[in-house]
Image (cartoon, grey):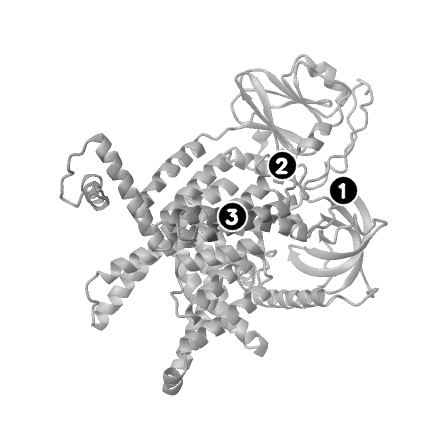
Amino acid sequence: MSHGGLRGRVMAAVWPAPGGRAAPLGVAEALRAFRAAIAADALREIERRTPFLWLPVAFGIGICAYFAADTEPSAAYAAMLAILFAGLAFLARHGPWRFAVLAGSAALFAGFTAAAVRTADVAAPTLDRLRIVPVTGFVEAVERRGEGQRLLLAVETMADLPADKRPIRIRVTTRDVAAAPGQFVRMTARLLPPPEPARPGGYDFARESYFRGIGAVGSVSGRIETLDPPRPIPASLALAAAIDRGRNALTDRIAGTFGGQAGAVAAALVTGKRGLIDEDTNDALRAAGIYHIVSISGLHMVLAAGAVFWTLRALLALSATLALAWPVKKIAALGAMAAATAYCIFSGSDVATERSLIMTLVMLGAILVDRPALSMRNLALAALVVMAREPETVLGPSFQMSFGAVAALVAFGSAYLQAREADGPPSFGIVGRAWRSLKAGAAALIVTTILATVATAPFGLFHFQTVNPFGLAGNALALPFVSLIVMPCAVAGTLLHPLGLDTPVWWLMGQGVAIVLSIAGAIEGWPGARAVIPAFGAGALALLALALLIATLLTTRLRWLAILPLALGLGAAARPERPLVLVDRDAAGAAIRGIDGRLVMVGRPSAFVKAQWLAADGDERLADDDSLTSAARCDPKGCVVRLPDGRAASFLTDPGALQDDCGRAAIIVVRGRAPGTCPQALLITRDSLARTGAVAVHEAAGRFRLEGARDNSAARPWARRAPEAPAAQPTSRASRRLPADPETDAAEPDPQ
């Protein structure tokens, strides 16, 4: 049977026309016909140059493979493999299948190489342990937070630490409002290494800090002194400080014009400074599913660049001479590119903002070369640029959610335009056109919101373990005010600010933000506005991401193949493995699953750590809920919690009580160094945690299994080095409290 005949019969048998009947086929013939149809659709994908869209996917997989390594890989070896496969792909360029496989392999190893090179490029010392030290340096950035400030300091000196052990940049909080960007200051700071994950698979602030050049975090003790600098401030630092001073001045002007939380949110939308927004407002925005509006990213960049593009094009079109003699659309695109770049720099150039800028520049650049601005190919180019520049962003929710949402919207837009071409002629009356536009706008808002919500849901659930069921309503009600009032005012106010004519605009913007906040507050009050689900593993996320990629990148019936990874991913996510015990990285506290199946908190874990544990367990209780400790039985030596099977788990603050609990508890966590061993129980000590980081204890088939947060990163540059453990000393079994440890008692730094 010919190839065309097979494909024709399988179309009738597997995908019959509406109202048609499937032609009977034997099993063997049906399988051959199905394979032929799959091959034919794959060839159509190649003809449409769809394989190019999978190059960024392969590049990203290579980056993920680099970060999954348990030792630091060789960048040179990965680069050699990338060059080898690229050469083989060139030789096999006339064979579409071989070329696709070899080019994908080259992209994978190129991504691996990019991540390794980036890690080496940003390498800088990280503080080894808790230190209370005098520090001097240049203030790089300042953010107001309530009654105090958070400073980013470029370190000049730190006690007697040599340059190879001294962080180049630290982040500290202070109650003193006395520092300004660009100043040279001296302070006494209580500093810690950036914290590692609070649980295996959790948020890794240490890795993020490493790639941002932050080697320590902490707080200022006492006052901050302003000194004459020992040397001229570096030019790059002076520029960054000048921009930050401008951002702070504009933040104060916007926030002060309207006042309250509406003013704080309005200022954050323009300058990216979110320190004035209180937690109640953040919770309301999250519950309504519109927290993304306070993070300057794709929405803001598109609205800002779009407003400039439309305005410039409209102004240039007013002149018939310019409209006929000059490419006004391309001139407007250049103006929008310049405005978007300036907006990115002024708003702080955060990772999300830079990524959005790259995407916007690629889209506008397509206009300059007479290509469609919104296309999946442009999105693929933007993803390659972002990943090559900052490979670590692939692991973060910002990259995953933004590109997932845009991919879904572009795929839908392409299908919609094709369907619209087959639609009837448009209405020509004023009323008809207005009605048609109104219907199209309402449908577009609803459909795009649904698509973006569905596309970003797997990543949001994986990273934050929360779902906002009324996010569709929140976006549908709030985004029109953001698009029609808030963001146009943000652009106009920024342009008028140098002239001193911006106050009325900020007031109008505040009115729009106030409406948005009232919508968010109302939705927050609805029953079930926020739900927490248990954390699922990276394998489930990978399957769900693959389903999204297949559904959005492919253009033929092969899209239906997304059903398989979608079903597998949903099945894996629906059966998460909940740990029996969670222990903080420094043994400050633990969460033990009680006899009722819920977590019981013992010790003194920070509020941030408790919130992380509860969210990962799908527990909606707050970190200060009294029921978190009610099932624990405590005395001066420690606490005991009954496990679901009736056995006991013990958390000891006095290591001398180890022998008392050794024969009675199945799991023993010792906050200090254990004075001996206990073969009858699973023993977790501070020394073992120094090697593993935070741990989760699982039980299967009657055996305990330990999972450490540092299992795959102990030898990586951003991981804290395990100290040499001194020999255990005998400890008196007299009843006494273990002295408080200053490192474990330190407040958890805010990862935001």
Looking at marks 3 and 2 on the same chain, the residue that comes earlier in the sequence is marked by: 2
Q: CA distance from mark 3 to mark 2?
A: 25 Å
Which residue carries the number 2 mark? 70
Q: Nearer the viewer, residue 673 or 372?
A: 372
User: Element at badge 1?
Assistant: loop
Amino acid type at image mark 3 = Phe
Question: Total marks drawn?
Answer: 3
Q: Residue at x 54, y 53 (%)?
A: 387
Closer to the observer: label 1 or label 3? 3
Does 659 sit above or below residue 481?
above
Q: Are marks 1 and 3 in contact (CB under 8 Å)?
A: no
Image side of residue 138 versus residue 359, left or right: right
Which residue carries the number 1 mark? 128
Q: Position of residue 131 (x, y in %)?
A: 79, 44
Closer to the observer: label 1 or label 2? 2
Which residue carries the number 3 mark? 85
Amino acid type at image mark 1 = Asp
Residue 224 seen in the current view:
no
Q: Residue at x 59, y 42 (%)?
A: 67
Quarter of the view holding residue 377: bottom left
Q: CA distance from mark 1 to mark 3?
A: 41 Å
Looking at marks 1 and 2 on the same chain, the residue that comes earlier in the sequence is marked by: 2
